[in-house]
Each structure stands twice: as C-alpha cells, then as structure tokens.
Image (cartoon, grey):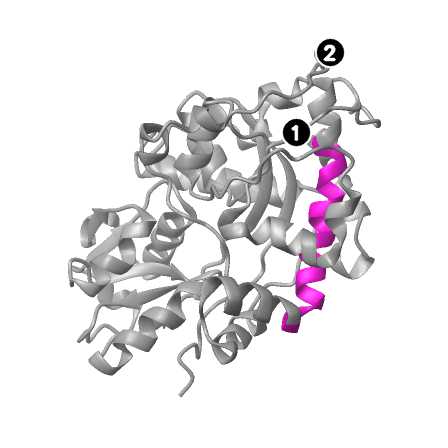
Amino acid sequence: MSLLQGVPAPNRRLFLRTLLGAGAALGLSACATARASGPALSSSAPLPTQVPAGTGLRIASALGAEQLQLQLSGLIKQIPFTVPSWPNIAAGPDVINAFRADSLDLANNAGIPPIQAQFQGYDARIVAVDLTRKPSYLFATKPHSDIQSVAQFAGRKLAFSQGQAQGVVLLRALRGAGLKDSDVHLVPLTSDQFLTALEAGQVDIAPLAVSQAPAYLNRYAADGAHTIPTDVVDLLNLLWAPADVLADSARAAAVAAFVPIWAKGLVWVYENPSVWEQEYYVKTQNISLSQAQQVTTLTNKPLLPPSWDEAIAWEQQTVDLLAQGGYVKSFQAEALFDRRFEHLASAAVPAEYRS
C-alpha cells in the first residue's frame, strides 16, 4: 500500500507561534534593508501602474520554494523591481514578527495569520487569493496507535496550533465528528514540534501537510503509525502585506506588479510536475522521487478567482469559528482584504485557472 494513500494535497501552512517567538528573539530587524520609498498612498486611491526605479521588496520564500519556482520558470526575470532578500520565513508568527520589525514586505500564508495579526492589533492586508479545493492536511498518529477515525479522537491528546491552518482544520474536523473542544485534550504546540511530539508519544494525533508525511511514515509505519484522511478543506492560500507597505506608492506598485508573477508561478509548478518533483522535493526536501510524485499528484490545481466573495465568506466563517472557541474576538473579515488587487491574479492566468 502506498504510504500516501488517502493523503490530501500539500500546502505550506505553518503554526503561528507567540508574538515574541524565536524569530523575534533572534533579531529579525537585523534583516532590514534600506529601500526606496514613494509618496503616501491612500487605501482608497487607485493602485499605481508604474514601479519607480530603485524600488525593492523583501519577499518571503518558505524553504526557498517561491524563489525557486520563479527561477525555474524564468518568471524571476519579469520582476520589475529589486528583491534584496528572499527570507526563509513561513510560519505565521515569524511572518508577523518580520512585518513588525520592518524586515519583510510580502508573504505567502494561509488565511489564519492575517486573522491573528488583526487580533494582535497589527494592520496588514490580503492582496492575492488562491483557492484550494482539495484537503491540504491529514492527521498522523503516534506509533502503535489504534485510532482509525476522527470520532475516535475523543479523550485523546491532539497537537493544536490555534493560530494556524492546522488548528482550524482540526477544529472543523472535530465539529464534523460531533466533538467539542472539551471532548479532547488540545495540546498547544508549534507546528515544528508536531513530529517530535508524535515520535515521543506526547500526543496521539497531529495534523500534518502531505509533504511531511512521507518521511514520518517511512520511519514509523512499521511501528503502527498511520494517517487518517480528512475531507476538511483549508480554502485559502494567499499573499499579504503590511498596511504601511501598501500605503507607500512605490512599494504598492511593486506588490501589484508581483501578484501576476506569483499567479503564473503557481500555474507553472502545476504544469511542470516532473521538474518540480526533482528540483524541489528531491533536491531540497530530501524525499525520494516516488514520494515526490505522490505529493504532486495530490497537489491542488491553482484557482485564482476574479471575485474574492467566496474567500471573504470563508475567512468570516473562520473568524466566527475561532471566536466561538474564545481564541479571537469577532470582527468583519472583509477588512483584511485590499480589493484593489482583486483582479490582478486572475487576469494573469488562463481561464481554466480562474474557476
């Protein structure tokens, strides 16, 4: 049986640590780089269409993925501004810390980090949306586990990341199985602690992205570790930026220019799976080619919608779910979206990637 049978598609969502997490402790401000600024831009003003010379953006590249896909596709040559750095920053708390430290201008995350940033009082906006129709996570068991379904999570210890997509997927799965938070033991952990906690038997279940599953199952499947699929979809894969970046006319123009390139990069990866398997998963993530092929087979097709209505409704449902559990205070999710950017990604891709 394939190690990834029934495993959902990958995604790059990582847990939001506390605001003063390891990234801040290491001094993210040291990464700050001077760059040209433009005149102030009102949030209601039209986006500039020309990027001034000397403009730069620091763009997050989780495990080098974003930068690599643009290099392999040749799209990196189309960027009409400088990119002084591609920080390897992915986890929500690290992104928020980097935004606060003025060390990062643009990042790729799930829908949860912008919610957490708003809850923490930090002003940032979503500028591009990619919808994922397939589930992005699965639940992995510790070795020697007899758990076979979400309904059997009752009374068990579950790795829980309240500020990240994994946590919301878990909450939605519990609700779908008729379980309340009080029916299980939620163990607060950062996502980079999930595998260690599973290996040590500190938790019974942890939500993992499919790209994490091969290595874990390769090592522990013989000891009874296995995966439990879920049909819960984590809908949003997005780009977001600090409000002060978007209030700078030069950097706002650069963000607007980058959104179509980002969208084309997603399409390129989807249309060139064999290159991506070898160059990214095998060479940089150290998994076998057969495992990489299983991962890319299950990857979501990019969907860059011309309207963000569905994304906003989904984000509102997520806010409401978290508010019901006392994890955040309720607010209107539409405030997270800068709809001036709404058409840019969809206009850059063929019609089959718009709906």
| Magenta stretch: helix, strand or loop mostly | helix
x, y percent for residue 130: 63, 50
User: Quick check: can you spot residue 58?
Assistant: yes
x, y percent for residue 60: 55, 40
| Mark 1 Cα shell of 10 Å, populated few (<14), some (14-19), many (≥20) | some
Task: Please state, as top left, top right, bottom left or bottom right, where the N terminus lies in the image.
Answer: bottom left
> Looking at this view, is 53 or 316 the one in front?
53
Task: Please state, as top left, top right, bottom left or bottom right, where the C terminus lies in the image.
Answer: bottom right
- Measure the alpha-carbon separation of dots 1 and 2: 19 Å
Judged left or right of residue 215, residue 211 is right
Residue that mark 1 sits on: 338
Query: Where, by quadrant of the figure, is residue 81 drawn?
Result: top right
The residue at the point 47 percent across, 76 percent down is 288
Q: Nearer the viewer, mark 1 or mark 2?
A: 2
Check disc 2 and give the amino acid type: Pro
Check disc 1 and give the amino acid type: Asp
Whether residue 110 is situated above or below residue 141 in the rendered picture: above
The residue at the point 42 percent across, 29 percent down is 28
Q: Is residue 265 magenta?
A: yes
Query: Where, by quadrant of the figure, is residue 94 drawn?
Result: top left
Q: Which residues are magenta?
A: 255-274
Residue that mark 2 sits on: 39
- Of helix, strand and loop, which one carries label 1? loop
> Looking at this view, is 65 or 205 the one in front?
65
Whether residue 67 is situated above or below residue 333 in the rendered picture: below
